[in-house]
Amino acid sequence: MNNVKEHYEKHLANFYSWMAGDFTKLQVEHQQFLETHKIKPLLTKVALDLGAGHGLQSVSLAHVGFSVTAIDINIHLLTELKINGADLKINTVKDDIRNVSNYKTLKPELIICWGDTLTHLENGKEIDLFLKESCEMLPSGGKILLSFRDYAQKLNGDERFIPVKSDENRILTCFLEYLPTQVRVTDLLHEKTKNGWQQKISSYYKFRISQDEVIDMLLRNKMKIEFCGKEKGMIAIIGVKN
């Protein structure tokens, strides 16, 4: 997955939870999103959370009644997920989301790939195959939930510097460089230590894909679009298997 794994292991995972914010508040908000869109177990009661991170989606899915398999490439985040989802029906697996077809024996009725994980895939062909394999394992009436940032439209000049979060000990800024099919994302973290402020920098790539391209891929895989809109600044799509 280009250099995403290395970026998370050596840089982002160390402050991901801090960057994301109040877990309980965000988890409740995501659960409300699920409930608003009537996302609940109706068939096999199994959900796959792909790119599960520290568990916002997995915990929400478990709370509404799903048995969840949470998949992520980063063991640090999965360890946090186990703590956040203690006593819930969540099984954590360290794996690449591109291996999604390995989990078809679980017979999921819901697959979620949330929080811009989709753009971690290297190119359009990888995304197309990932969605094809995900949709194929869903039963009729099964659903796929996706969210991702719209990098199709370029930011220009100083707009490319995005202040993400800051407090008395940390300042996180994100810088975007637009390439023909990718965006190079650089996370610049300034962290206060006993020796003064230290700067830590790491970059990785995300694929630039549009809302219309993703919808077209879903439609070609026997899905109908139940919802398409914005959720916390990202494109959010709910597809239902015909």
Image: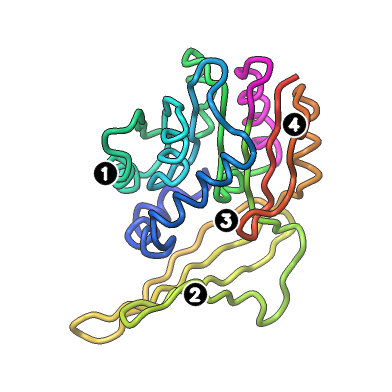
The three-letter amino acid code for the residue at tag 3 is Tyr
Q: Earlier in the sequence, mark 4 or mark 3?
A: 3
Residue 173 circle label: 2
Q: In terms of image quadrants, where is residue 37? A: top right
The three-letter amino acid code for the residue at tag 1 is Ile
Q: Position of residue 158 (x, y in %)?
A: 66, 82
Q: Position of residue 119 (x, y in %)?
A: 61, 48
Determine the residue positioned at 52% across, 43% down.
1
Residue, far bottom? 196
Residues rendered magenta in the picture:
124-143
Q: Secondary structure at mark 2?
A: strand
**Residue 201 higher or lower than 100, as above or below:** below
Q: CA distance from mark 4 to mark 1?
A: 34 Å
Residue 212 circle label: none
Q: Main secondary structure of the magenta part?
A: helix
The residue wearing badge 3 is 205
* Viewer-side label of 3, 2: 2
Q: Earlier in the sequence, mark 4 or mark 1?
A: 1
* Viewer-side label of 1, 2: 1
Determine the residue positioned at 76% across, 47% down.
211
* Viewer-side label of 4, 3: 4
The residue wearing badge 4 is 218
Q: Earlier in the sequence, mark 1 or mark 3?
A: 1
The residue wearing badge 1 is 83
Q: Earlier in the sequence, mark 3 or mark 2?
A: 2
Q: Are marks 1 and 2 in contact (CB under 8 Å)?
A: no
Q: CA distance from mark 1 to mark 2?
A: 28 Å
Q: CA distance from mark 3 to mark 2?
A: 16 Å
Q: CA distance from mark 4 to mark 2?
A: 34 Å
Mark 4, Cα crowd under 10 Å, few <14 / some 14-19 / many 20+, is many
